[in-house]
Amino acid sequence: MPPSFVAQGASPVQDFVAKFVGVKHVVDAGTNNEKTYVFPNDDSLGILLAVEGFDVVNAITLGSLNPLSVGDHTVDSYFIFSAMHCDGLPPGDPDQNCLPAGETLFGSVEFTVIPGH
């Protein structure tokens, strides 16, 4: 881990939970219809631990977003951390195994809303 890394838990999973601030979703970024939703690390998120004997952390949004109009859309999703988090897995390269404080894009999805669905 980088010299600046300070763990806030006895394991990488506990560190994730301690530093995880929330999830941000940006719908239709850069358009007139852009909307941003932030789900803080509280009862609106589910954090999964110890799945089939292996610790896994996945911030699942239990809240919902407003319905979207018919047509094409994008959603950009970000993890938000209060401090650097490292997963503790090999190879131990900060560029591959650590996420910085602040927002980190973790996924983008493009989809189409069809009438009547």
Image: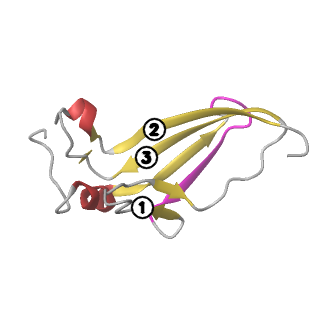
Q: Amino acid at mark 2?
A: Phe
Amino acid, disc 3: Phe
The residue sitting at the front extreme is 52
Q: What residue is pinned by disc 2?
A: 106
**What is the secondary structure assignment of the residue under circle 3?**
strand
As for residue 33 lying within the magenta part, the answer is yes
Residue 62 x, y percent position in the rendering? 58, 62
Of all residues, the one furthest to the right in this rendering is 116
Give whichever of 50, 104 is nearer the camera.
50
The disc placed on residue 48 is 1
Left or right for 34, reference 52: right
Quarter of the image for the N terminus: give it: top left
Q: Which residue is mark 3?
A: 79
Which quadrant of the structure image shows residue 72?
top right
Q: Report the residue at 18% width, 37% height from top.
A: 90
Query: SS class of the residue under badge 2?
Result: strand
Instruction: Identify the residue at image location x=61%, y=34%.
Output: 109
